Amino acid sequence: MDTEEAIDRGIRFLEEKAGHYTHKLENIKLAGAIWIIRFNVGFFEDVRVELKIDDATERVVSYEQLK
């Protein structure tokens, strides 16, 4: 999976599973076999979330809201 596919997979998860329809990409990196993607999903205030996506399976393995 390349960078664009990882971002698309992350956005699809945010919209379909987490209910976040407003999202702004803040950071993405590949650490080993895991894509770590940070989005700001807030509308009026900053709400940051981090997704970890397995590169081989394209599954979201972690989702958390950052403080």
Image: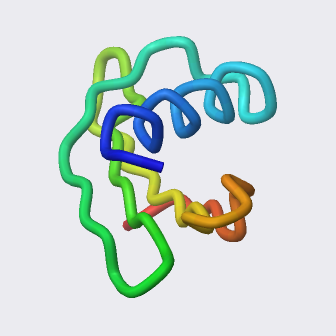
1 on left or right of 3: right
Whether residue 30 sits left or right of residue 6 in the image: it is left
Residue sitting nearer the eye, 4 or 46: 4
Instruction: Please indicate whether residue 1 sits to the left or right of residue 26 in the image.
Output: right
The residue positioned 25% from the left and 55% from the top of the image is 28
Q: Which residue is found at the position 43% from the left and 65% from the top?
A: 35
Q: Looking at the rendering, which quadrant does residue 23 occupy? A: top left
Q: How is the image coloured?
A: rainbow
Residue at the outermost right position: 17
Residue 40, given in percent of the width and then of the height, sits at 32, 37
Residue 27, horizontal then vertical, whole percent:
20, 52
In the image, residue 19 above or below residue 63: above
9 in relation to 64, above or below:
above
| Res. 14 image quadrant | top right
Q: Which residue is located at x 49 percent, y 74 percent?
A: 34
Q: Is 59 left, or right, of 39 in this rendering?
A: right
The number of numbered badges drawn on the structure is: 0
